[in-house]
Image (cartoon, rainbow, N blue to C red):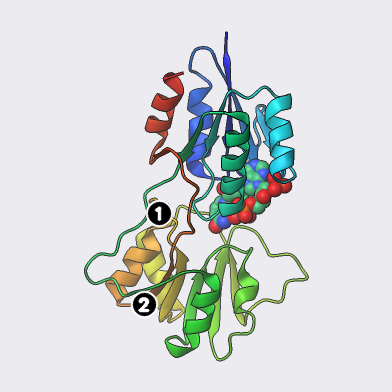
Amino acid sequence: MSLIVLILGGTQEAAELAKTAINLPNIQVKLSLAGRISQSIISENCRVGGFGGVTGLIKYLQAEKIDLLIDATHPFAAKISDNAAIAAEKLGLPRLMLVRREWEFVTDDKWIEVENIQTAAAILPSLAKRVFLTIGRQELTAFTQVENIWFLMRMIEKPAPDIILPKGLLLLKRGPFDQDLEKQLLDEYNIDTVVSKNSGGDATYGKIIAARELGVKVVMVKRPMLPQGKQVEDVEAALKWIKEF
Ligand code: NAP
C-alpha cells in the first residue's frame, strides 16, 4: 500500500523534496503552492492556491486521503504553518516542518535585529538614507510612508498596480544572487542599509556578505514563531522522515 505525502511548498527545498520523494517506493507526492508567483514551474502532481483556511485544509487532507504532511513553506509564511499544525493535529496526521537554518551574526556584520517589518520601517529614518529593500513584494506598503529615504526594491514579480510604492527603483530579479554582483549593486546605488528577512539559505546570502564587506548596515527582520512540532533543516532529513513510515 502506498502513502500519500502532501508537501506545502513555495521554497526551493520543497521543490527539491517533491522531485526526490517521488522516486521513493510506495510514496505518492503532492506539492501545494500558494500561487503568488505567476511563473512558478507547475508539475503534474502540483496544486495551486489557498485551501480556504484551516477548514479548507482539513477538507482537502481528507478528500485526498493524505497520510503525511510536510510543511516546507518559507520560514516567514507563518499563517500556513499554523494552519497546517492545527489541521494535522485535528486529523492525527504526522507532520514535519522543513525549515532551513537561519543566518547567524558573524564578526564585522552590522546588524540591527528587529521583530517584524513594521519595526524595520519605523527605525529606518534614524539610520538610513539609501536602502536596499529585499523583503519581497507583499509587505512593501509598510515602507510607503517612510520619508527622506530612497529605496532600491528587489523582488521576483511586480507588485499589484494599486500598491503605492516607496520612493525609489524597482528591480525585478529571481535568485540565486552572486555575492560579487551584490557588492557591485550596493556600491552602484550607494546603499547605506539593507533590509532583509532572516530567510536563511545560500541563494540570498550574497547580499549579507556584501554588506559585511562594505561596512553596510543590515536591518535583519527576525523570524516569526513557528508552531510546535518536529523540525528538520534539509531535504535529506525530510526524506529520512518519510522513509520511517
Ligand atoms: P502565509 O501568510 O503563511 O499564508 C497566507 C495564505 O496563503 C495561507 O493562509 C494559505 O491560504 C495560502 N498559502 C500559503 N502557502 C500555501 C501553500 N504552500 N499551499 C497552499 N496555500 C498556501 O504565506 P505567505 O507569507 O503569504 O507566503 C505565501 C507562499 O510563498 C508560501 O507558500 C511560502 O512558502 C512562499 N514564500 C513566502 C515568503 C515570505 O517571505 N513570506 C518568501 C518566499 C516564499 P488559505 O488560508 O486559503 O489556505
Residue 70 percent coordinates (x, y): 53, 34
Outermost residue to the top: 1
Q: Is residue 104 left or right of residue 19?
A: left
Contact? badges 2 and 1 (CB < 8 Å): no
Q: Which mark is residue 200?
A: 1
Which quadrant would residue 3 be assigned to in this image? top right
Q: In this rendering, is residue 145 above or below 200?
A: below
Residue furthest to the right: 162
Q: Position of residue 222 (x, y in %)?
A: 43, 64
Name the disc covering residue 167, or none.
none
Residue type at mark 1: give it: Gly
Q: Secondary structure at mark 1?
A: loop
Marked residue nearer the N-terminal end (2 or 1): 1
User: x, y percentage for residue 77?
Assistant: 56, 53
Q: Is residue 182 above or below residue 9?
A: below
Q: Quadrant of the N terminus?
A: top right
Q: Is residue 34 visible?
A: no
Q: Nearer the viewer, residue 44 or 74?
A: 74
State the image quarter where residue 30 is shown: top right
Residue at x 49% of width, y 59% of height: 224
Residue identifier under label 2: 217
